[in-house]
Image: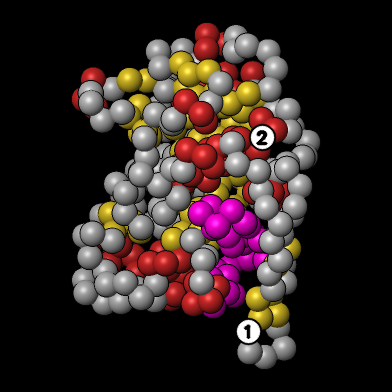
Amino acid sequence: MPPDTDVGSCRQPPKKFSWRLGRAGKNRYDLMVTTKGAQFLDCFGLATGPGRLIVALVGAGGKTSLMLRLAAEGKALGKKVLVTTTTRIFVPPPSCYDEIDLEGTLFGGSPRAGAGVFVAGVLDPQLVGQDKIKGCDLQLLARRVSQFDLVLIEADGSAKRALKGWRKTEPVVPQFATHTVGVVDIQSVGQPVSDQLVHRLQIFTELTGAAEGDLVSVHHLKKMIESDQGLFGKARGEEILYINKVESQQDRENGERLAAIAGGRNVVCGSLHENFCAVIR
């Protein structure tokens, strides 16, 4: 089971939350929190809309937990949801899915009728005992997505670190993705740059200009996000930045500063642990 996954969160309804952020000067950021059964789906603009939604999640600091939360909300809306990966993920706990296919067939193209969460992958002999699966064949996945209303793909790996640098082949975002959600752990701000915090440390320092031992700043995160080889370097479809772990006043202030300099893409702040999300307008 992934260490950042709360089993209960797969069944937990959203709670009401009200929050407004401001910063010095004339500009203000208004944060809108939805209170319907699709709290996070609404914040990401995934609850409704034309066509099939295929969402790739990249980054570090909460991808798996976010994916399972979106899946649970999709099921609650009557959607048939596929959860899979193009890299490797822990097998989700049974409370988080209705059916699972670890044979690499993607349910043979015939998942059962009705709403539900369907997990698909392939058991990797190299990962025996680690409770991990790898992704199915991408060409097969491209053919099978038509069987589902919402497809959630964990398309990046971070080795349980809060931040990462990306090789030229990463992340592995399918060309047919309609959305790319980039996850950033705002609680990394103020922590020293180290192997314990950062996956692929050398690449991260090259991307951001940070040196090992420096304290992570909002501007380091901006460079990580905006670099051509950064968080959205392989993005497809609509890009959404998700600033995760906003759980204190300092987190809120750091999240606000990051949102202000993170470019023109849509930005969502929130906390899966505290069970809220907010859209920055």
* Numbered tag placed on residue 23 in the rendering: 1
* Observer able to see residue 105: yes
Which quarter of the rendered picture does the C terminus lie within?
bottom right
Q: At x 60% / y 9%, what residue is drawn?
A: 110
Q: Classify 165 as above or below 80.
A: below
* Badge 2 amino acid: Gly
* Numbered tag placed on residue 52 in the rendering: none
Q: Classify 126 as above or below 156.
A: above
* Observer able to see residue 87: no
Which quarter of the rendered picture does the N terminus lie within?
top left
Q: Classify 128 as above or below 182.
A: above
Q: Residues in magenta? A: 253-280
- Secondary structure, mark 2, is helix
**The quarter of the displayed image where residue 9 is located:** top right
Q: Classify 198 as above or below 19.
A: above
Magenta-span inclusion, residue 278: yes
Q: At x 36% / y 75%, what residue is drawn?
A: 190
* Badge 1 amino acid: Arg
- Secondary structure, mark 1, is loop
The foreground one among 245 and 260 is: 245
Residue 112: x and y, percent?
A: 63, 11
Q: Is residue 95 found left or right of 38 in the rendered image?
A: left
Residue 236: x and y, percent?
A: 56, 44
* Numbered tag placed on residue 74 in the rendering: 2
Q: At x 28% / y 22%, what residue is drawn?
A: 124
Judge the density around disc 2: few (<14), some (14-19), many (≥20) Cα neighbours within 10 Å. many
Judge the density around disc 1: few (<14), some (14-19), many (≥20) Cα neighbours within 10 Å. few
Residue 27: x and y, percent?
A: 70, 83
Magenta-span inclusion, residue 208: no
Q: At x 28% / y 59%, what residue is drawn?
A: 198
